[in-house]
Amino acid sequence: MSRRALRRLRGEQRGQEGPGLGELGFDPGPECLECWIRIPCPGCPCSLSLCLQIPAEESEDEPAAGEERADTRLSEQDTAGGDQEGSEDRAVTEGTDGDGQREGQEAEQPERTLATSDKPRKKKKKRKTKKNSAWETVEDNELEDIESLLERIEDPRLAPQSQGGVTADSRPLLYVEHRNLNPENELKRYFGARAVLGDQRPRQRQRQYVRSMWLTAPKNTWPRYSKTGITMQLLDTRRGVQHFTFEHHREYQQVQFKFLDAVESMDPNNIVLLLQLNPYHVDSLLQLSDVCRMQEDQEMARDLIERALYSLECAFHPVFSLTSGTCRLDYRRPENRAFFLALFKHLMFLEKRGCPRTALEFCKLILSLDPENDPLCVLLLIDFLSLRAREYTFLTRLFQEWESHRNLSQLPNFAFSVPLAYFFLSQQEERPELERSQARERAARLLQLALVMFPSVLMPLLDHCSVQPDARVSSHPFFGLNAQISQSPALNQLTSLYVGRTHALWKDPAVMAWMEPHVHEVLRMVEAQDALVQEAEHKRKIRYQSAPRNIYRHIILSEMKEATAALPLEVTSQPVMGFDPLPPLDSIVSYTRPERTSHPSNESTLSLFFRSLLPNFNLQGDIRHDGDDEAGAAQDLNQGVNRLMAAMRDMLANIQFQEPPRDDNPEADGDWD
């Protein structure tokens, strides 16, 4: 039997033969021990021919067999130190026949070793280690323990519960996970890595070196990145919150001035030319992305937004963190607005792409940058993304923690989305029955409060869902047309925005069946003249007089037709730029654009006509400021007339009359019929 076969029977690794015999509880007899040392003995159970073929078999598969055998003999001699004397006594008692066979074997052994050494050596193959049954049992038990621990950690029933029956999370509310910022991770969960990556893996090895980013993945088609002149500075730290700001260097300011000139020209080609010279100018990328989106080039629009995010992320401060939720940016500073807008437009593309979980993570990131002011009013969007991503626990936790100081229930989107989230939680069978019943009760109570506070939402919502209500509901004035007409324009904008955005989530027949009895219960409260109904009507008349500027900014960026049509005239009458829609009235300006040379407003019509033909023409020339010098005034008049005559001569000299084309076909000449 070969040494390899013995190792496999005993479950040993190569080089551990000696220690393995005693440790595994296997007590070899004297015959087997002698066979292991390759000295054939009369009592060996295997034949002499097999013992002599051991070196030949091992040499074909093991290149350094001689050295390994020597090491094996040394290890065996050290291990069997206590049995050495017994083996010598046993060899003496075997007689001279055994000695003769050993001498013949020892004489024949070098010849066979030399014969086998001439064969070509093969590469040693790696073999998986096979452990004994006892070790496998211990390892299996440990794996089972680890798997059971992981199941307990992932089991929502074993997680800590809050008083409202919702899973409590020790992490900050606006904590952002890096892995959820990559849309490919979400697409892999839906479709698999092979369908998402495709042929990208071999190409990634050949692409040029680029910085690894969290917000976007750089592409090979992008221009080579170089410093753009944007940096981030740490302003101060207050109560564990760090306040940062972006800064524009002088070179970037000059490019920004050229960009403003290109925007005023109303020609997108000027922005394209500017990007060819400055491929990572952020405002140009944002503005050109809007142009591409209007031209239905969604892929190019998304690519430009990702490039803008890449440019801004390269300028991050070393201490700035995306995940901690304690880093702030002031939207009043124009340098910071581009980052807010790029993140918002990027999450809108992600939501349309079918990545609501990634879009929710970007929404949390925007909210964490300025949670108090919320300049883009992402609170009107975060509930929709949470429902689409099935993050019901996050939405209910946000409502519980922020309701006391932000009055989220006074927003129609939270008033209706939170009970819908509780309803979906009550439908999850893996949750305990007690938690499901609590969620069901809270969903019913909050839905009734939402219908009482915002009755104008019901009929448009049913209309978008193609659901015909019964006669009692459709004919009742509380939910009828009167409820929509009597509400203020600001409340109409909020309700229109919510219905247009989230009506698809209410189309589920189970949701409609759950909502129907609560609608009738609200009608019963109205007919009974409940005090809650009168209080809600009083709140609607007082609290929704006018919408703040951040809500208008959110409606413009969202481009919801239902909400955009309800914008007031003072918003729609002013020009709105994609790189800075509705800037704050209390902006903190760090640098100003130099004033362009303004022309006098008292010019004559003839002077304006010549200026339109010749932009460099100036009838008045260099105006003298010493008004007391009459001679100087007369001289200026003469110079102005001379300039006017010179300009007319230049204009007439440059006029060229084009001759009419000649017809070389003489046969075509003649009178017309």
Image (cartoon, grey):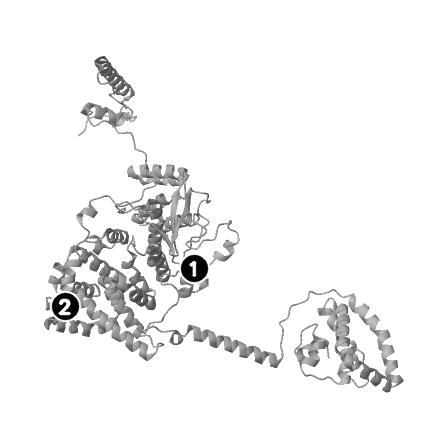
Tell me the mark number nearer the camera, choosing from 1 and 2.
2
460 displayed left or right of 329: left
Between 516 and 658, the residue placed more toward the observer is: 516
Whether residue 240 can be seen here: yes
634 displayed left or right of 472: right
Q: Quadrant of residue 88?
A: bottom right
Q: Residues within 10 Å of mark 1 (few under 14, many from 20)?
A: few
Helix, strand or loop under label 1? helix
Between 50 and 254, the residue placed more toward the observer is: 254
569 displayed left or right of 273: left
User: Where is residue 19 drawn, in percent x and y?
Assistant: 70, 77
Residue 178: give its label: 1
- Number of numbered discs on residues: 2
Q: Give the labeled residue for mark 2.
A: 533
Q: Quadrant of the C terminus?
A: top left
User: Where is residue 207 drawn, in percent x and y?
Assistant: 51, 50
Between 486 and 516, the residue placed more toward the observer is: 486
User: Where is residue 99 drawn, in percent x and y?
Assistant: 87, 81
Q: Is residue 521 above or below residue 122?
A: below
Helix, strand or loop under label 2? helix
72 displayed left or right of 340: right
Between 190 and 562, the residue placed more toward the observer is: 562
